[in-house]
Amino acid sequence: MGNHDMAKELYQGLLAQVASEHFYFWLNSLKEFSHAEQCLTGLQEENYSSALSCIAESLKFYHKGIASLTAASTPLNPLSFQCEFVKLRIDLLQDFSQLICTCNSLKTSPPPAIATTIAMTLGNDLQSPWEEFRSLASPYGDLYQASFDADSATLRNLELQQQSCLLISHAIEALILDPESASFQEYGSTGTAHEYSEYERRMMSVYNHVLEKVESLNQKYTPVSYMHTACLCNAIIALLKVPLSFQRYFFQKLQSTSIKLALSPSPRNPAEPIAVQNNQQLALKVEGVVQHGSKPGLFHKIQSVCRNVSSTLQSKSGQDYKIPIDNMTNEMEQRVEPHNDYFNTQFLLNFVILGTHNITVESSVKDANGIVWKTGPRTTIFVKSLEDPYSQQIHLQQQQAQQPLQQQQQRNAYTRF
């Protein structure tokens, strides 16, 4: 609920009340995360040196928390979502800290008017801070797509973190890089009705305030000034002052969905490649079973399962022949509705180029609302493409026919000398 001061004390009192080592580390990680978020409550606008100290202190507790959370993971409960979410939070705080430092440098040592030309001449990337936040928004989207079993509040939290990255990216572009082409791409909810939490209402209020401020400065655009850098720093502080909300289902998995795949043919040894002749197609059969927990379809229901099959050439052997581009790669996708949680399909793959090929089979699901979720799993097998016996015999005959000619040419060369 964002009351991290109280939560930290509750977690501290519960640490000695559990008998499992994993539960201890789990509660300890929650305590460290609450302590990390509590450090950010003291942020003040215009006080940027203090903001850097608060962020550094928060990062210290976040790193301690992620270490404890990793220790709490087990093979049956790997806590992969929670670990990834916290890692992204750490990356975001580090980028915020770096941007505040950059803005402070611009204020204390303003660049000359020809700084842009000099930087481009030296090959320095002026857009690296902008791209940093753009690229950080992408993993939040990937984590969202991989979280099929998450509740709507947790998914909305991911969207808000992604929007925060895009908002700062938009502010950098509008205030510093290119104010005329700047646009803010907001990621809305999935369309499902939900109640707005207090955290979400406060975050949306911050978004609107920052956008209004950026738009106001954008209309009075001048070369980078104190007002521009101050607006960026204040936007970061406003975002961090809203305590990050860990929803009640964040560390639970009330819905559990997994897919098990079986590939045929399959090698006896995973590292051993499957042999196939280059003039034949490999019929790859993919069977699967959808496994549910105690509450199937609690948040999302599976409508269809999508299988993507792709192959890449790992190592090439034999001579190079002119081969049509369409025959060099395999990229296929099929969707099927599971019956009694079972599904199967086949793919016909070409391996014209001699050598070892890497086949990747990846599964995803489509829910009743038409949203595709990258649930996995991702399976890899190897195929070795061999030359067919007829072509091999022809090439052998050609080599044998060329040998007398080469020997005659060598004799003629010796005779001349």
Image (spheres, grey):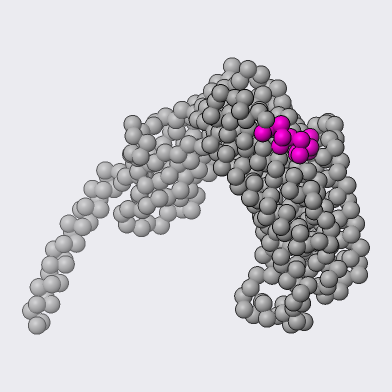
Query: Residue at coordinates 78% horizontally, 72% vertically from top-left?
Result: 107
Would you say residue 152 is visible in this rendering?
yes
**Image vertical order of residue 34 relative to residue 253, above or below:** below
Image position of 31 (left or right of 202): left
Q: Nearer the viewer, residue 360 or 200?
A: 200
Q: Nearer the viewer, residue 56 or 401?
A: 56
* Residue 113 x, y percent position in the rendering: 77, 82
Is residue 2 one of those drawn in magenta?
yes
Q: Nearer the viewer, residue 100 or 205?
A: 100
Q: Nearer the viewer, residue 160 or 40?
A: 40
Query: Residue at coordinates 72% horizontally, 62% vertically from top-left?
Result: 99
Q: Quadrant of the N terminus?
A: top right
**Image vertical order of residue 192 relative to residue 128, above or below:** above
* Residue 186 x, y percent position in the rendering: 80, 49
Is residue 180 one of those drawn in magenta?
no
Image position of 413 (left or right of 168): left
Query: Residue at coordinates 39% horizontally, 41% vertically from top-left?
Result: 382
Image position of 310 (left or right of 178): left
Would you say residue 156 is visible in this rendering?
no
Q: Quadrant of residue 32?
A: top right
* Residue 92 x, y percent position in the rendering: 69, 52
* Residue 410 x, y percent position in the rendering: 13, 72
The magenta stretch spans which residues? 1-12
**Image vertical order of residue 152 relative to residue 230, above or below:** above
Q: Quadrant of the C terminus?
A: bottom left
Q: Main secondary structure of the magenta part?
A: helix
